[in-house]
């Protein structure tokens, strides 16, 4: 199992209304860069098992916890950009149910002065 911390909170689906394609594309790039950096840090610290260093060829389970200043409805959390970034970085084979089991997606309030971030577990 690997655990990645990225300094981005999961966006609301409302963010993609209207100019959704371009915003989604921008968010995918942000998540991809942040996940790539977190992966490099974890790898340098020796916390990435060998199985995760090659492109994914097995079904994986993920858990996502987002730490937010302001909570939103759980059904409004958007994980699309995050999943697409994990696929692009080859940590997931695909984001279809054949290759991915999403264990949970939840959020925690951190107050107005806290730093928003997202925690990802991949098994």
Image (cartoon, rainbow, N blue to C red):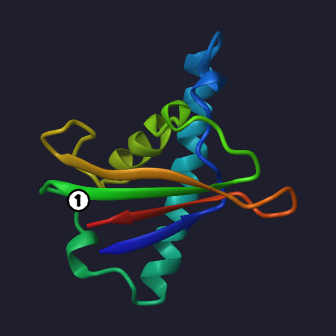
Q: Residue at x 68, y 44 (%)?
A: 71
In the displayed orientation, state which residue is furthest to the top.
18
Q: Is residue 83 toward the left or the right of residue 109 in the image?
A: left
Q: Is residue 107 toward the left or the right of residue 62 in the image?
A: right
Looking at the figure, which quarter contains the C terminus?
bottom left
Label 1 belongs to which residue?
55
Where is residue 114, by image quadrant?
bottom right
Q: Position of residue 47 (x, y in %)?
A: 39, 85
Q: Position of residue 43 (x, y in %)?
A: 42, 80
Q: Residue at x 74, y 45 (%)?
A: 70
Q: Position of residue 116 (x, y in %)?
A: 71, 57
Looking at the image, is 4 positioned above or below residue 62? below
Q: Position of residue 44 (x, y in %)?
A: 47, 85
In the displayed orientation, state which residue is furthest to the right.
113
Q: Is residue 110 toward the left or the right of residue 92 in the image?
A: right
Where is residue 112, by image quadrant?
bottom right
């Amino acid at each position: 199992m690997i655990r990645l911390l990225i300094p981005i909170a999961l966006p609301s689906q409302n963010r993609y209304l209207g100019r959704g394609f371009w915003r989604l594309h921008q968010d995918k790039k942000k998540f991809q860069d942040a996940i790539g950096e977190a992966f490099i840090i974890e790898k340098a610290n020796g916390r990435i098992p060998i199985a995760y260093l090659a492109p994914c060829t097995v079904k994986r389970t993920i858990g996502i916890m987002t730490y937010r200043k302001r909570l939103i409805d759980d059904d409004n959390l958007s994980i699309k950009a995050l999943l697409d970034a994990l696929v692009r970085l080859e940590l997931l084979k695909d984001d279809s149910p054949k290759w991915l089991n999403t264990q949970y997606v939840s959020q925690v309030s951190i107050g107005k002065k806290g730093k928003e971030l997202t925690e990802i577990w991949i098994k």
